[in-house]
């Protein structure tokens, strides 16, 4: 994919700020920058060492637009692998807009979304998994999510994929020798050796794939819905988790009439936590809409937290809600433990696993640490925890690994049946291709456009 034009865009977020940055990339970058910038020393940008901040003014003819610091990064040692200019001016709507307009009048094109990073990939500075990690670093909601994204940006996933593809390549090389020189006096690879190699590759792919569920949660957040009948303490629980009075709490049943959403960090896990209206039969039109929204929310939830009033026996409304949670990841909280207990645990255990039941007092902030531990255990399932940053966080990568895993199983089945090497070779070539989708070695241009369209303009 040949690139011969020069692009520019604002690289900082819109709005007022201390600094605004305009980025230019392409073969005309230096020429354009020197036509609009005057340094205080009178020297041109090319007269300075690269990567040096040069103080001066941005001018349109004789008219000064703004003071600026300009840096020149000569390709290929730049973000895009091309000549790059970055202009640091005063942050604000007008300054950056006028400078960008001036640059675009110099036969420079406005960059598409993610085009700077796309050029970095096309110019071989980073691979596709590293490019996608950049957006994850920007959007990370917790320290752990940032660590995983930063690890991928540094190449941890790229390295692993290269190792796997090398193993596949070695098998393919042996197969091709055995096929092409079947009548020659060369050592053929045995079915026993093929199976051992295939099992090794399969285990590596599965180990990586198994991190995808936890990885997706770290990247996108765990949609967690708090449900229960009215006045059991759902809003009090939300306020306790957030550490602030986000939801209105009263003794009047039906106070919460709409869905309230907040992001919260639980032990490095981002939770998109949703407080819902109490689920009950009601004639109130507004409350009825809230109840319907509650049901929609927990139907699409990754985790459901059901709150019960432990100072009261299970009601028919409680039982009806519990029956709908049979196939959901659920934690049941017995709230109001500061009051005399009247709920029947034995009856409750007919609906949910006892290990998922936690006693709390949202009012007194008791039991919340146990709830956090339970959420952490459910996300990591005791396998990944915080010790590893090599995780699959991208659904595209997960899909590619699944297809590679299916192909390695097909290859093993063919080996077990002692099928001709030509058939087995097809499966291994598929594995090689699917793994290549992850780092971009076998990706198509239309997919690149889709991936980078999710980036902001200027990145």
Image: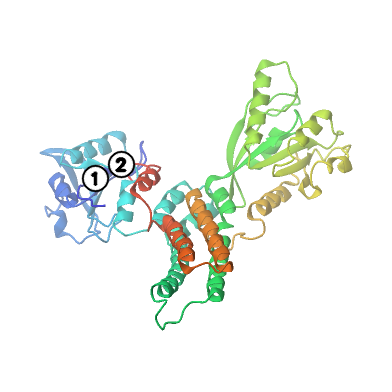
Q: Is residue 407 above or below residue 113?
A: below
Element on which disc 2 rests: loop
Q: Tag count in the figure? A: 2
x%, y% of residue 381?
A: 66, 56
Instruction: State the mark number for residue 7.
Output: 1
Crowd around label 1: few <14 · some 14–19 · many ≥20 (10 Å)? many
Whole-number angstrom distance, CA of label 2 to CA of label 1: 9 Å
Crowd around label 2: few <14 · some 14–19 · many ≥20 (10 Å)? some
Q: Is residue 454 above or below residue 129?
A: above
Horizontal relation, residue 51 to residue 316: left or right: left
Determine which residue is flagged by label 2.
Answer: 112
- Spot the residue most to the front: 183
Element on which disc 1 rests: strand
In percent of the image, x 42 and y 82: which residue is there?
186
Quadrant for residue 178, please give it: bottom left
Closer to us: 1 or 285: 1
In percent of the image, x 33 and y 50: which residue is there?
118
Would you say residue 245 is visible in this rendering?
Answer: no
x%, y% of residue 357?
A: 78, 46
Q: Are marks 2 and 1 in contact (CB under 8 Å)?
A: yes
Horizontal relation, residue 41 to residue 244: left or right: left
In percent of the image, x 36 and y 58: which residue is there?
126
x%, y% of residue 59?
A: 15, 41
Q: Considering only order in the chain, which callout, 1 or 2, is on the residue closer to the N terminus?
A: 1
Q: Is residue 259 above or below residue 186?
A: above
Q: Is residue 153 above or below residue 8?
A: below
x%, y% of residue 248?
A: 66, 28
Horizontal relation, residue 70 to residue 237: left or right: left
């Amino acid at each position: 994919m040949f690139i011969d034009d020069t692009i520019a865009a604002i690289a900082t977020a819109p709005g007022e700020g201390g600094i605004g940055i305009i980025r230019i990339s392409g073969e005309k970058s230096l020429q354009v920058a020197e036509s609009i910038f005057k340094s205080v020393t009178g020297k041109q940008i090319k007269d300075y060492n690269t990567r040096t901040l040069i103080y001066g003014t941005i001018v349109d003819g004789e008219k000064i637009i703004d003071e600026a610091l300009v840096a020149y990064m000569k390709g290929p040692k730049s973000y895009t692998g091309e000549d790059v200019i970055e202009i640091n001016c005063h942050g604000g709507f007008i300054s950056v807009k006028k400078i960008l307009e001036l640059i675009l009048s110099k036969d420079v094109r406005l960059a598409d979304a993610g085009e700077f990073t796309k050029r970095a990939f096309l110019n071989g500075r980073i691979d596709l998994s590293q490019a996608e990690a950049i957006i994850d670093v920007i959007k990370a909601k917790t320290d752990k999510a940032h660590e995983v994204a930063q690890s991928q940006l540094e190449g941890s996933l790229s390295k692993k994929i290269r190792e796997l593809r090398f193993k596949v390549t070695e098998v393919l090389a042996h197969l091709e020798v055995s096929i092409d020189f079947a009548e020659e006096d060369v050592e053929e690879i045995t079915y026993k050796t093929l199976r051992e190699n295939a099992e090794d590759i399969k285990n590596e792919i599965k180990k990586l794939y198994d991190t995808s569920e936890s990885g997706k949660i770290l990247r996108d957040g765990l949609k967690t819905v708090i449900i229960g009948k009215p006045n059991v303490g759902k809003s009090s629980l939300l306020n306790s988790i957030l550490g602030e009075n986000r939801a209105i709490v009263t003794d009047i049943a039906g106070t919460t009439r709409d869905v309230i959403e907040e992001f919260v960090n639980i032990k490095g896990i981002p939770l998109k936590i949703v407080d819902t209206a109490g689920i009950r039969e009601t004639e109130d039109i507004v409350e009825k809409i809230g109840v319907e929204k509650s049901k929609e929310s927990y139907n699409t939830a990754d985790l459901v937290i059901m709150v019960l009033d432990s100072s009261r026996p299970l009601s028919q409304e409680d039982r009806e809600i519990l029956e709908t949670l049979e196939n959901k990841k659920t934690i049941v909280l017995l709230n109001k433990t500061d009051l005399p207990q009247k709920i029947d645990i034995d009856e409750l255990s007919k609906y949910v696993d006892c290990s998922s039941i936690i006693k709390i007092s949202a009012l007194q902030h008791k039991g919340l640490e146990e709830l956090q531990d339970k959420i952490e255990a459910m996300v990591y399932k005791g396998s990944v925890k915080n010790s590893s940053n090599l995780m699959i966080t991208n659904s595209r990568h997960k899909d590619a690994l699944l297809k590679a895993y299916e192909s390695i199983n097909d290859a093993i089945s063919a080996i077990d049946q002692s099928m001709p090497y030509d058939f087995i070779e097809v499966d291994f070539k598929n594995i090689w291709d699917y793994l290549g989708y992850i780092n971009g070695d076998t990706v198509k241009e239309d997919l690149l456009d889709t991936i980078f369209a999710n980036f902001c303009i200027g990145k």
